[in-house]
Image: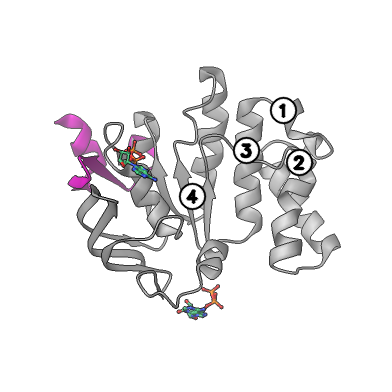
Amino acid sequence: MSMIEFHDVEKYYGKFHALKNINLTIDRGEVVTIIGPSGSGKSTLLRTINGLERITSGQLIVNDFDLADKNTDMNRIRKNVGMVFQHFNLYANKTVLDNITLGPTMVLKRPKAEVEDSARELLKMVGLEDQAAKYPSALSGGQKQRVAIARSLAMNPRAILFDEPTSALDPEMIGDVLDVMQTIAKQGMTMVVVTHEMGFARRVGDRIVFMADGQILEDESDVAGFFDH
Ligand code: ADP
Ligand code: ADP
């Protein structure tokens, strides 16, 4: 069953044609990596999926919501579709634990004690159970990104979008973040990942989408084959 469907999608920023005739279907549980040169529209494509950018025309269905419909409640999309950014976007004045519990308590109105228990479980899963009381400024980039991933998971999303999640990290931090992403992938999460990490694309991705100049030039399920040519 499909989680994300683009049909003939176009996106303009003013006169600039950022997405051209995008047709792409992503199934539930699929891990799709998006690669391509800088400025090719990868981030724009990702941001349309959770409504951070509106499409100009065509059809975009995400978790059965119609994103081209002006009446669709974008807050509901963002509850269903998490996003992990290059620069973490953690709340600087909240502890690691509070960064994770804020969404589930404030947005989903779940009970605080229960939310804290699951937040500590998530911190364990990302290898940061000892860091709960710290503030983001005390963490390395790799640790911050793992907190951001835990925060996204705490909302129990149907899919998670990753926008160059390792591009701002020192090389020695990247492996830990990719390991966490691999764990989530194995648990069956639908993931769309914009990345330059070809090793991740090859090992973890079910599919590779190659973009250039606002278009999808290749959409390849034969990941090993993609790297052979
Ligand atoms: P990528 O992620 O592949 O680097 P982007 O999706 O960020 O590409 O950008 C694609 C093109 O759209 C770029 O030329 C960029 O300058 C342009 N662009 C992105 N966001 C905006 C915006 N908010 N307003 C105008 N142009 C934008
Ligand atoms: P889930 O979290 O299981 O996706 P929701 O309660 O968020 O369940 O929504 C269930 C379905 O109801 C959505 O997939 C969507 O098709 C429809 N729906 C509910 N509210 C809205 C809304 N405000 N706008 C558009 N569709 C909606």
Who is closer to the viewer here, 193 or 120? 193
Say which residue label 1 marks: 139
Residues marked 3 and 4 touching at CB (< 8 Å): no
| Badge 3 residue CB within 8 Å of ligand 1 | no
Who is closer to the viewer here, 19 or 125? 19
Q: Amino acid at mark 3?
A: Arg
Q: In the shown orientation, is residue 169 left or right of residue 124?
A: left
Element on which disc 1 rests: loop
Element on which disc 4 rests: helix
Say which residue label 3 marks: 146
Magenta stretch contains residue 176: no
| Badge 1 residue CB within 8 Å of ligand 1 | no
Outermost residue toward the front? 14
Q: Amino acid at mark 1?
A: Leu
Residues marked 2 and 1 touching at CB (< 8 Å): yes
Q: Amino acid at mark 2?
A: Val
Residues marked 2 and 4 touching at CB (< 8 Å): no
N-terminal-most mark, 2 or 4: 2
Mark 4 surroundings within 10 Å by alpha-carbon count, few (fewer than 14), some (14 through 19), many (20 or more): some
N-terminal-most mark, 3 or 2: 2
Residue range highlighted in magenta? 202-229
Say which residue label 4 marks: 186
Q: Residue at x 73, y 47 (%)?
A: 99
Q: Residue at x 79, y 34 (%)?
A: 135
Mark 3 vs mark 4, CA separation in Å = 17 Å
Residue 138: quadrant of the picture:
top right
Nearer the observer: mark 1 or 3; the answer is 1
In the picture, the disc for residue 96 is 2
